[in-house]
Amino acid sequence: MIRKIVLAYSGGLDTSVAIRWLKERYNAEIIAFCADLGQGEDLKVIKEKGLKTGASKVYIEDLKEEFVKDYVFPMLRANAVYEGSYLLGTSIARPLIAKKQIEIADMEGADAVAHGATGKGNDQVRFELTYYALRPDIKVIAPWRDWPFNSRQSLIEYSEKHGIAVTATKEKPFSTDRNLFHISYEGGILEDPWAEPPSDMYTMITPPEKAPDRPVYIDISYEEGNPVALNGEIMSPATLLANLNSIAGEHGVGRVDIVENRYVGMKSRGVYETPGGTVLHIAHRAVESLTLDREIMHFRDSLITRYSELIYYGYWFSPERKAIQNLIDDIQRDVTGTVRVKLYKGNCYVVGRKSPNSLYHPELATFEAEDVYNQKDAEGFIKLNALRLKLRKLKI
């Protein structure tokens, strides 16, 4: 028998309805948990709304620094990008939310945990894989796989009938998810992959056509693969990302519109804004270009697809993700230096990089006269590498 349920709660349409529905369905006490990951909402209002909707308690936890330091930064150290475009802003938030949810369930003696993810999406997998990895015996309730509602329109009608305030409307029903790293938009009017998103939809980014006519230059300093300072000013992880979001967002940097392959098997159109994260990804690769050995870099790059899939699919707490992370972090020990980027009208250009651990030697790379590199050595190098190619044409 389920007497107490901890619900991952955002204050949005799905989880607001979930409080009321779970309470009626299970006749259980509902404890709501809302993680402050920098979504920019009035969390006091969300707490009041949760209590008013039927939760006995609403936990609000400020997780911004932990989110950036222990989840976003490790992911950026790995240069993770899913299917060449998506910087995994929603994916990387789910394991932290689920981890804290399990901690609250343990503290409260709850029988079950619940989430508002749909049965068609990736988040259900991400939440539940984390639940089971951290507490194998926990009961999991996924309302979207059980309740009678079959669309967000029906949820809106239910909420209106029961006096539950929601932000989604029938005129603008797309779903959003925001944290300090990004904001996503999907569903509703975005389901036609040919249709351009409405111009008033964007939140974190100024449209490039309205961005400043003058570029801005930023210096980003790295230590062992992590950004630690902007323009020479040392900042905490969350503060650095928030500041960079503001600057990059003003200049229109970090928007992508993609059709991606969900883990459950279907394709989905998603629109994402990741201003600060886009700049950090580009800058990180720039400092790596100076400090990483060629073969180490190429070997690490061969792991990016797999690592990105593990995050997208929900395997943050898997042994294979941890093993890859340990290797990546070992590789990152020399990734220290400063990168200068130029932001202009939606673009981020690397215009300078320097490092105390640089493997770049001007006396070797120069096209001018030098006494270090003997160009005649290249002849034997080429012939040895050509041998296997020549053998294909040689007659025995």
Image (cartoon, helix red, strand yellow):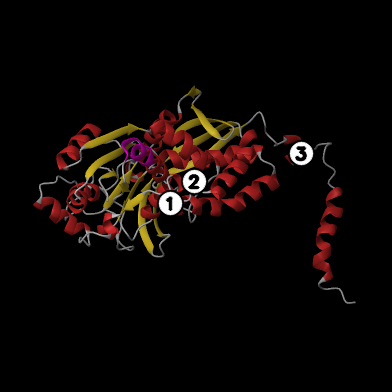
User: Mark 3 and mark 2: span between their CA atoms?
Assistant: 44 Å
Residue 189, position in %: x, y?
25, 58
User: Mark 1 and mark 3: span between their CA atoms?
Assistant: 50 Å
- Which residue type does callout 3 highlight? Leu
Q: In this rendering, is residue 315 above or below 110?
A: below
Q: Are marks 1 and 2 in contact (CB under 8 Å)?
A: yes
Q: Is residue 285 left or right of residue 62?
A: right
Q: In this rendering, is residue 115 above or below 151?
A: above
> In the rendering, which numbered label is found on residue 129?
1
Asked if residue 391 is among those painted magenta in the image, a careful observer would answer no
Choose the circle earlier in sequence order: 1 or 2.
1
Residue 175, position in %: x, y?
27, 52
Q: Which residue is mark 3?
A: 364
Viewer can see residue 232: yes
Q: Residues within 10 Å of mark 3 (few under 14, many from 20)?
A: few
Asked if residue 105 is among those painted magenta in the image, a careful observer would answer yes
Q: Where does the C terminus fall, quadrant-wise?
A: bottom right
Residue 345, position in %: x, y?
40, 42
- Which residue type does callout 1 highlight? Leu
Asked which secondary structure carries label 2, the reply is: loop
> In the rendering, which numbered label is found on residue 317?
2
Q: Are marks 3 and 2 in contact (CB under 8 Å)?
A: no
- Look at discs 1 and 3 and give the one toward the viewer: 1
Q: In this rendering, is residue 327 above or below 26?
A: above
- Which residue type does callout 2 highlight? Phe
Tell me the quarter of the picture where residue 251 sits: top left
Q: Is the magenta region chiefly helix, strand or loop? A: helix
At 65% across and 50% down in the image, what residue appears?
Answer: 299
